[in-house]
């Protein structure tokens, strides 16, 4: 049986490297998750899960994460990624995570992802108490990457 996470943290990273894979890898390292195995999940935070500033993750561990990421090799192109997290009004309800990335400025990407959270709560007929966002923007020189994530874990 898999244990439900009870803590989560919002992280981000950006990088410029010689290849998009190396840029993505470095953006993961800068976000604090580069020495783990990310397991991409759908976008629900378990009830009673608490936001923490940071999580010390075991190297090589399988880490549940919802993330947005984009890479580019177009010099001068702006790339952005953001995560929106809706914290439920009732702690007995699950939270909601939305992810979005685009070749537009961060302000646009964060506005879209925030609206995605609001819409997700609306069609679930639930109320949120707060919507948090975290995002990152990068202007590509050669090969760039951006990464924003909600990392879930256990304490």
Image (cartoon, rainbow, N blue to C red):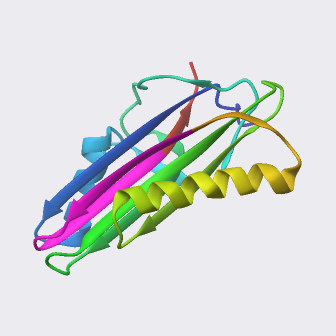
Q: Residue furthest bottom?
A: 74
**Frontmost residue, 4 versus 138:** 138
- Please say if 112 is above or below 10: below
Q: Quadrant of residue 152?
A: top right
Q: Quadrant of residue 54?
A: top left
The answer, for residue 57, to whether it is visible in the render is: yes
**Frontmost residue, 54 versus 119:** 119
Residue at the spot x=82%, y=33% of the render?
Answer: 93
Residue 153, percent across and down?
A: 55, 31
Residue 32, percent across and down?
A: 32, 38
Q: Is residue 127 left or right of residue 102?
A: right
Q: Quadrant of the C terminus?
A: top right
Residue 130, percent across and down?
A: 64, 33
* Span highlighted in magenta in the image: 132-149
Residue 12, percent across and down?
A: 35, 45
- Please say if 145 is above or below 37: below
Q: Is residue 37 left or right of residue 17?
A: right
């Amino acid at each position: 049986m898999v244990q439900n996470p009870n803590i989560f943290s919002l992280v981000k990273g950006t990088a410029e490297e010689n290849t998009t894979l190396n840029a993505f890898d470095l953006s993961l390292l800068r976000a604090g998750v580069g020495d783990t195995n990310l397991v991409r999940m759908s976008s629900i935070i378990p009830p009673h899960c608490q936001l923490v500033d940071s999580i010390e993750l075991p190297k090589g561990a399988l880490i549940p994460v919802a993330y947005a990421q984009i890479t580019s090799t177009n010099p001068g192109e702006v790339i952005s990624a953001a995560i929106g997290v809706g914290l439920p009004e009732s702690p007995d309800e699950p939270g909601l995570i939305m992810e979005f990335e685009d070749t537009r400025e961060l302000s646009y990407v964060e506005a879209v992802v925030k609206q995605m959270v609001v819409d997700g709560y609306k069609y679930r007929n639930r109320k949120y108490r707060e919507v948090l966002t975290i995002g990152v923007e990068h202007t590509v020189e050669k090969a760039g990457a951006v990464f924003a994530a909600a990392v879930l874990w256990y304490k």
